Image (tube, rainbow, N blue to C red):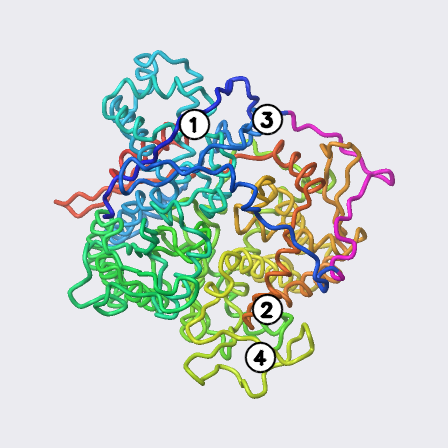
Amino acid sequence: MAEMHHQLLHIHTVKTIDRENVKPLAEMDTKRTSTAGPNRKVHEPFPALWRRLSLAAPVPPLHDPSRLASQRKIFTPLTAFASPLISRTYTMNAQELKNFLADSPPSTVNLEIKKHFDALTDQQKRYAHFISKAAFAGTRITLRQVSPESTDIYDFIISLYKSCNGDWASLQKKAGITEQELNSFLEYSTQFLGNAGNYKGFGDAKFVPRCEEKAFTALAATSPEADKYYKATQGAIFSSNNAGVMHLGYLDEGHMTTYYPDSPTITKADISAVSDFLEQKKLLIENTRLRKTADGSFELLIASAVTKIPENGGDLGKATEFEIDSGPLKGHKLKLVYGDHSKEMSRIAEFHRNAAKEAANENQKKMQLAYAESFETGSQETWKNSQRFWIKDQKPTVESNIGFVETYRDPHGVRGEWEGFAATVNLERTKAFGGLVDSAQEMIPKLPWSKDFEKDKFLSPDFTSLEVLSFAGSGIPAGINIPNYDDIRQSEGFKNVSLGNVLSAKAPNEKIPFIAEADLALYQKYRDAAFEVQVGIHELLGHGTGKLLQETKPGVYNFDNKNPPISPVSGKPVTTWYKEGQTWGSVFGSIASSYEECRAECVAMALSCDFEILKIFGFGDGTANMDGEAGDVLYAAYLSMARAGIASLEMWDPKSRKWGQAHSQARFSILQCFLSAGPDFCKLSYEKEDLSDLTIHLDRSKITTVGRKVVEDYLQKLHVYKSTADLEAGTKLYKQMTDVDADYWGGKVRNEVLRNKQPRKVFVQANTFLDEKTGKVELKEYEPSLKGMIQSYAEREV
């Protein structure tokens, strides 16, 4: 089942657009006149924001399904397992298409690791090698989770590399294309590999090549193998006529997703009903996909090496067929189908068994064997146990994690994307994070909620700064706080990591729009330091804090349900909490990821105002002083968040009114929070009608007073609604705070964001090679270039 080749039938009606004459975004004029003074315009989008939050103001829907109902067609799939394509409507003109063109050039940077890897022992190198191989062995899983065509595009790129052995100039000559056309292919391929698919890992929007289709056709014609894969894409590399399918999302809302493959009629309501049933069964579904069959029944595709239920049964015993017994799908059948991604899962499990042989201790060995068993059998409960061993693996020299971890890209927010990493610990930078952990007990009471809404005991986690050897997936974060299971986090703990060589990687010639000229030098000097502080607080005291009030067993609660705690928001006893079996993700669904990122970011903004924390990171002596270096770091942190809030509009789609990235949605809401404090604290200034001179003006002297208070007011609501499972209030609040009006934010500001947008970094990562005879592991690094990126993937043999 897992190894079946998914294809997509496209009726190829793409309107020809002269991509060569569409001006690259990177070449657009970004100059603006810097002016300051009383005549500058100030935009105050939400002068009465907090009054609005208490009102039942209507929120525009993220998407109006009725708008597409009469325009949608489902094409017959090529095979019984082919994914459907929604017909191409909403034809885009060249101006609209420009925003979906591949970066030119993408910012290729090295993930520098050699000196850290060389310091490892031979055993540690082998341990890291096998984990790295396991992580990248799942590349095709990630591709399969993005779009039906992604695996074929990947094979097309790699087969072309192999056909010319990386001699792209000879391939250009053989294909009879221009140097510019070849470069467009290399740029597209690099961005594709960096995002593990043809949709952006950060933003969930499709990107298409900047050249004409004939150039790719000519390249494909040079190799029978490449031509086979190119034809299998059925035009999907270039297709861009359907604006809805240019974004990941629910199928019945006109978007693209392969978490629900071969299911042209599956709806959001179907997914919710099946999720509710599986929640009642207490089945973890991060490692699954869901298919709706022609007769209206459902198949839950479980990622596993085995293609039938394990001999000892699965997480639900030996049963594989169920009848949904309640809700709108009552009477419908659900079947568990093992073997999704079976070929990859088998290889991955073997790599983990080899890693177990090189483990530094018994706990690491148990962790690696739990990974192997989980990926072999499809048991997500076993994977959950691996995370218990992971938490206990304190201060390892080689750190790692792997699996179906984050649920950002599943439109329903419950199924995880494949990712994995192997890294070495940077002991020097880890000291600062250790100091932050030590200060946690003093810092948590400063957050705007009582102990009723906080864990009974803060379980001090391991917090390390890592130098990443390998990170497989659709993108690389700056920091990580896992596991995501609240029952483990509440009673057993969690771990935090900061990815040092990701944070320090610099793209050449990076533009910095929206920062006033007077602030630019300070911002450039301290933004990296400010971001490291932000990441540390965000991961440890953001994601690491908070209690979910819940019924843990029938009639058993982790709070006094007879005398519920008083909500600091309403001043009244809380009336909602999590029922048995419910989780944060299952209750808040598709908004859970972004909402939680927002809560963690708000914690970072609030506690970065504490100068004792800034001292831990080497800034100041702990005394509140906005005029010293610690004040510079804090000011840079607030400027950075405001700027991120503006830049986030790139990830908002005006047609669907949908946010494409969890962190971006969160940061936009925090910008609105800043602005709600009034223009005396934060304002956006401009003189030109097209906002080409838009800059942020933020009163540095008021950050620790006005700024901190307005952030804490917002944070308190976010936190209490999460703690109490108050979906209604939480959803209303978050939708209001992330609503984008079409004229100012969605029009003028977004246009300026797109004009200034920067290509996201694409990390060129090293490979490791094991000499079976000597047991030595060789590290091979690649040049940070388009050709280096493709070569690195071709030599991974995945």
Name the side, left or right, on which 411 lies relative to 121: right
Residue tagged by mark 2?
721
Q: CA distance from mark 2 to mark 3?
A: 41 Å
Relative depth, front residue between 701 and 106:
106
**Boundaries of the magenta span:** 29-51
The quadrant in which residue 481 appears is: bottom left
Distance from the alpha carbon under mark 2 to that under mark 4: 13 Å
At 47% from the left and 55% from the top, the residue drawn is 429
- Name the residue type under label 4: Asp
Spatial CA span between label 4 and label 1:
54 Å
Q: Quadrant of the C terminus?
A: top left
Q: From where the camera sits, is residue 541 visible?
A: yes
Mark 1 element type: loop
The numbered dot on residue 95 is 3
How far apart marks 3 and 4 lie (CA) works out to 53 Å
State whether residue 469 appears in this view. no
**x and y, in percent, of residue 52 in the image:** 74, 59
Q: Please provide percent x and percent y for residue 66.
A: 55, 45
Magenta stretch encompasses residue 38: yes
Residue at which label 1 appears: 238
Q: Nearer the viewer, mark 2 or mark 4?
A: 2
State which quadrant residue 24 falls in. top right
User: Looking at the image, which residue is at 57% across and 56% down?
Assistant: 533
Q: Amino acid at mark 3?
A: Gln
Q: SS for tag 4?
A: helix
Residue type beneath disc 1:
Phe
Q: Residues within 10 Å of mark 3 (few under 14, many from 20)?
A: few
Give the mark nearer the N terminus: 2 vs 3: 3
Q: Give yes or no for residue 415 being in the magenta stretch.
A: no
Between 419 and 584, the residue placed more toward the observer is 584
- Label number found at residue 452: 4
